[in-house]
Amino acid sequence: MVKPITKETLFMNCMELDFATKVELEHWVATFEERVWTDDVMKELSKAGLVRRTVAQVWNKDNHRLTSTFEYENEDAYRSCQKIIEEKVMPKALANYTIKSRNNRGVIFYDYRS
């Protein structure tokens, strides 16, 4: 059975983060919450419409990659959150980490949950 789309899963961004080495990836995993994605930043993003954020380590490729998925209430929430990320997250991220990133944004049209 396909459940209907809810506001919890309407608009999303999936980002791939590639690191040059395993050590750099592990450093990001160990420090990203205290250095960049702090509780204060996450609370502000939640107020702006961020519903969910997940980070996963990719294991089926021969690389050092994480995926970070953001789910927003709607496109306006996405835009509001992007402003916060540009102002409060990116300067710290660029100062602390060397990564390549690629973003894929979309509107969810199918969401199976059991």
Image (cartoon, grey):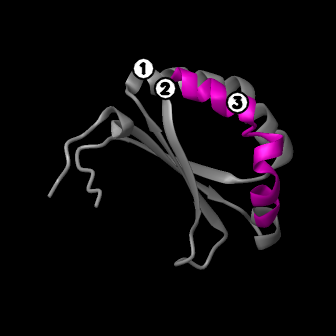
Which of the numbered marks, if any, corresponds to residue 109?
none
Question: Cα distance, mark 1 to mark 2?
Answer: 8 Å
Mark positioned earlier in the residue sequence (2 or 3):
3
Q: Residues within 10 Å of mark 1 (few under 14, many from 20)?
A: few
Give the class, few, some or many, for how many residues have Cα within 10 Å of label 3's Cα (few <14, many ≥20). some
- To which residue does mark 2 refer? 49
- Which secondary structure, mark 3? helix
Q: Are marks 1 and 2 in contact (CB under 8 Å)?
A: yes
Q: Position of residue 7 (x, y in %)?
A: 33, 32
Q: Which mark is residue 76?
A: 1
Q: Nearer the viewer, mark 1 or mark 2?
A: 2
- SS label for mark 2: loop
Q: Is residue 90 magenta?
A: no
Question: Hey, what amino acid is under mark 3?
Answer: Val
In the rendered view of the protein, which quadrant contains the C terminus? bottom left
Q: Residue at x 47, y 28 (%)?
A: 78
Residue 106: x percent and y percent? 36, 41
Closer to the chain start, of discs 1 and 2, is 2
Mostly what secondary structure, the magenta segment? helix
Residue 41 highlighted magenta (yes or no): yes
Please indicate whether residue 82 sits to the left or right of residue 33 in the image: left
Q: Name the amino acid type tagged 2.
A: Gly
Q: Residue at x 52, y 78 (%)?
A: 60
Asked if 10 appears above or below 24 in the picture, the reply is: above
Residue on which the image places disc 3: 41
The mark tally for this picture is 3
Dividing the picture into quadrants, the one containing residue 44 is top right
Q: Going by the picture, which residue comes out furthest to the left?
A: 1
Callout 1 amino acid: Asp
Chain part drawn in magenta: 26-49
